[in-house]
Image (cartoon, rainbow, N blue to C red):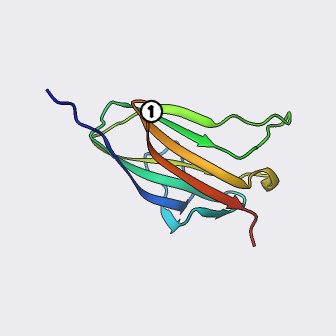
Amino acid sequence: MSKLKPVVDIIYSGIFSQWDSESDQLPKFLQATVHVPATIDIEFGFIARIRKAKNQLLRYCIYHPNIVDADGNIRPPFDGEVYVKENDWKFYLGDCIWAPISDKTGDWRMTLELNGKVVADKTFKVHLPK
């Protein structure tokens, strides 16, 4: 029996409406871009369409620029794992800007991995608003 090879495509990337992590609803896509103004509560990231991977473990990771915690230590990347829920599933990976914005500028890299292989990779350039 042959094993299906997962197919992953980034279908939307850029700025989105605010995302409610408790809801099954994905955020609304607002603007295609990799250039994101560092504005409080702006939501950005991507929606990936994942096919032929039901029940496989999906690892996500957001590499922030050198954002510090309350103690002045650089925060580690934000990562986690979820199981792919359906054979044709849409997954949102994103973040938003919070105060202070001074340490939020720079490259924010977001990745998805299946079976130890990066299957989606997008870098957003967060900059001070003009």
Task: Find the residue positioned furthest to the top.
Answer: 1
- Please name the residue shown 49% across and 54% down the image: 46
Q: Position of residue 124 (x, y in %)?
A: 60, 56
Q: How many marks?
A: 1
- Please name the residue shown 72% across and 58% down the image: 40
Against 53, is 19 above or below? below
Residue type at tag 1: Val
Q: Position of residue 17 (x, y in %)?
A: 55, 60
Under tag 1, what secondary structure?
A: strand
- Please name the residue shown 44% across and 30% down the image: 116
Front-most of residues 23 and 45: 45
Q: Position of residue 103 (x, y in %)?
A: 79, 50
| Image side of residue 88 versus residue 76, left or right | left
- Please name the residue shown 54% across and 61% down the image: 14
Query: Residue 16's image quarter?
Result: bottom right
Residue beneath disc 1: 82
